[in-house]
Amino acid sequence: ACLNERPVKIIGSHAGLSVGPDGATHQMLEDLAIMRVLPNMVVLAPCDSLEAERATLALAADPRPGYMRLAREASPIITTPESPFEIGKAYVLSEGHDVTLVATGTMTYHALKAAEVLYKDGISAEVLHCPSIKPFDREALVASAGKTGCVVTCEEAQINGGLGGAVAEVLGEECPVPMVRVGVRDQFGQSGTPEELFEHYGISTKHVVLAAHSVVEKKRFRV
């Protein structure tokens, strides 16, 4: 499909650790990396059901082959029917000046919750939601990273080659700043509740907050 540039659309369900008790055989963690490396492939990860509807319509109308990742479990609604969606665009959901939290899919909710905690800690966090992993909004990322001076990426997926990989590539080429990736680190999933698994693999709201504190410190002591 990609080689011949055919408009084949693939919907990947049961993504991430939130599948829970079904375990490693059902917890798709490698899809963002696998699909992103394919030439001509569009890769989307909406944050909630409302954005998934808009992404579906956009993907159906797009002439390129495309992949969209969906979670099985219900997730919090953080967009509205009027929220913008465009393939290739990222959106600032909360403005800040100390650190940029770059998130995709279900992790955008956790990034927003982390920003609330960080505000109480005296850290102003900007939340950049990236439902489009490929094409990637390089301009939005560079603008935010240039303003805050450090970045945390948040994904319910393998950090190798996924959102964290995409962000590292852009920052390395265009805006080198301290960065910490929050995601699954070269491991398969296992059975457990979503809450237990998020804690075990270090991707819960708490771990986003800790990563933000860490990268802000790196920025302060950067030579």
Image (tube, rainbow, N blue to C red):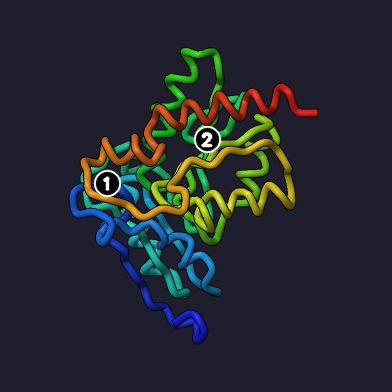
Q: From what the image shows, is residue 122 above or below residue 168?
A: above
Left or right placement of residue 57 versus residue 19 in this view: right
Residue ranking furthest to the bottom: 4
Could you say where residue 26 lies in the image, as x and y percent from the top left? 25, 59
Q: For the residues marked 2 and 1, what is the alpha-carbon distance in whole angstroms?
A: 20 Å
In the rendered image, which quarter contains the N terminus?
A: bottom left
- Residue matched to label 1: 18
In the rendered image, which quarter contains the C terminus?
A: top right
The reply to whether residue 46 is in sight is yes
Could you say where residue 132 lies in the image, as x and y percent from the top left? 48, 55
Residue ranking furthest to the left: 21
Asked whether the beta carbons under mark 2 and mark 1 sit within 8 Å of each other, the answer is no
The reply to whether residue 53 is in sight is no
- Residue matched to label 2: 101
Quarter of the image holding residue 116? top left
Q: From what the image shows, is residue 59 above or below residue 173?
A: below
Q: From what the image shows, is residue 129 above or below residue 41?
A: above
User: How many labels, in total?
Assistant: 2
Left or right placement of residue 127 versus residue 112 in this view: right
